[in-house]
Amino acid sequence: AGGGHTLCASENKVYSWGFGMAGRLGHGNDNTLFRPKEIEALAGKTISGLMTGLDHSVAVVQVGG
């Protein structure tokens, strides 16, 4: 978990929730979410890693994935 936000992956989907300041949840806005929401830009991608920090989130996507 990062600074007030979280990422998780399941079956080629990535979800985020928490404080959305500075777009850190990956949904194209600064909204705070209290329940997991799929990050649509990553739908169907093959994710090999996730990381969160104080003010950022990272998803490592396999090339061609």
Image (spheres, rainbow, N blue to C red):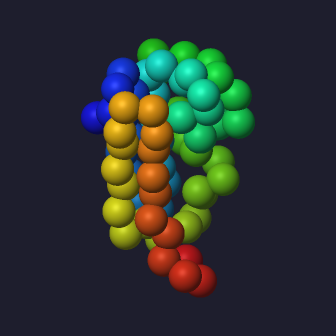
Q: How far across and how far down the image is residue 62, in percent?
A: 48, 77
Q: Identify the image quadrant of residue 31.
A: top right
Rendered position, 15 above or below 30: below
Q: Nearer the viewer, residue 45 or 57?
A: 57
Which residue is drawn at the image coordinates 55% and 67% (left, top)? Answer: 45
Q: Nearer the viewer, residue 32 or 55?
A: 55
Q: Nearer the viewer, residue 24 or 47?
A: 24
Q: Identify the image quadrant of residue 34.
A: top left
Residue 20 falls left or right of residue 11: right
Quadrant including the N terminus: top left
Rendered position, 8 above or below 12: above
What is the total number of numbered labels drawn onto the structure image?
0
Q: Residue furthest left?
A: 1
Quadrant including the C terminus: bottom right
Q: Residue furthest front?
A: 54
Rendered position, 25 above or below 60: above
Q: How far across and how far down the image is residue 12, in percent?
A: 46, 62
Which residue is drawn at the image coordinates 60% and 57% (left, top)? Answer: 43
Q: How far across and how far down the image is residue 25, in percent?
A: 53, 34
Q: Residue furthest right?
A: 28
Which residue is drawn at the image coordinates 64% and 23% (left, top)? Answer: 30
Which residue is drawn at the image coordinates 55% and 23% (left, top)? Answer: 20
Residue 12 falls left or right of residue 23: left
Q: Identify the image quadrant of residue 23.
A: top right
